[in-house]
Amino acid sequence: MRFYLITDDDVFINPRQLLSFVRRRDPTELAIYGPGFCDWGVRRKHKEMIAATLGVTLPQFLHIVIGGIMLFTHAAVKQFSDATVLMRCIDDLETLYANRIKLWDGLKDSAMYNQDWLFCWCLQVRMGGTVHLDNAFEDIEFPHRKCLSISDASRELVGTHHTNPRRMRAL
């Protein structure tokens, strides 16, 4: 089992749940797991503009993992270690930004892109991989389950994002 986990400093990870989760996943799959949004803000007309600008064929859906918790398979990390592929992805996002084409509905107007966008774009568009938006991960500020408590999340989930210091001490 070889996976790579990136977290923010306001993430609680349940080690038992994490181990159980990765045991049921294939490290050779080209994938990223985490909480996120399904095809958020990237509609057909928008995709047509992106495809025409970059000369690429886009997948049917472009998912985005919220970067507070990103679990990469070994295969994904290996692909990202290829500087040529990574630079091509950075060039894609800079080209879109220069042409005023905003991915994911301009989620962050103040930034050209961030690591979430870079990894999700690159994996899905340039590498042909999959972004899995999994309910084992939760972002408390954008919860799938609206009544989820921090204590329930810490017991049931692999990772919980946006837990503040007071909440972390309570866990």
Image (cartoon, rainbow, N blue to C red):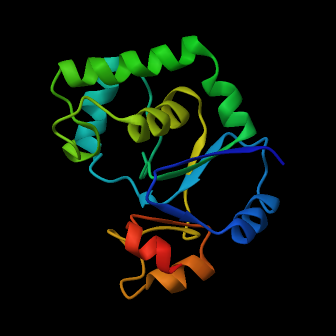
Q: From the viewer's perspective, tell me whether residue 47 is left or right of residue 171.
A: left
**Residue drawn at (22%, 35%) of the image:** 102
Q: Is residue 91 above or below residue 18?
A: above
Q: Quadrant of residue 16?
A: bottom right
From this view, report whether residue 3 is shown above or below residue 89.
Answer: below
Q: Is residue 101 left or right of residue 31?
A: left
Is 63 rendered above or below residue 84? below
Asked if residue 1 shows in the view, the reply is yes
Q: Which residue appears at 24% of the width and 38% of the height?
A: 46
Q: Position of residue 162 (x, y in %)?
A: 39, 64
- Identify the residue at horizontal 25%, vertical 28% (top origin): 112
Image position, residue 150 (x, y; %): 46, 80
Please give the name of the residue rendered at 23% of the width and 33% of the height, measured from the top-left corner: 111
The image quarter in which residue 129 lies: top right
Q: Position of residue 22 (x, y in %)?
A: 75, 58
- Asked if one can make out residue 55 in the rendered structure from this viewpoint, the answer is no
Q: How many marks?
A: 0
Residue 20 shown left or right of residue 132 in the figure:
right
**In this rendering, is residue 155 above or below 120?**
below
Q: Nearer the viewer, residue 75 or 138?
A: 138
Image-quadrant location for residue 4: top right
Q: Is residue 26 left or right of residue 161?
A: right
Query: Farthest top residue?
Result: 84
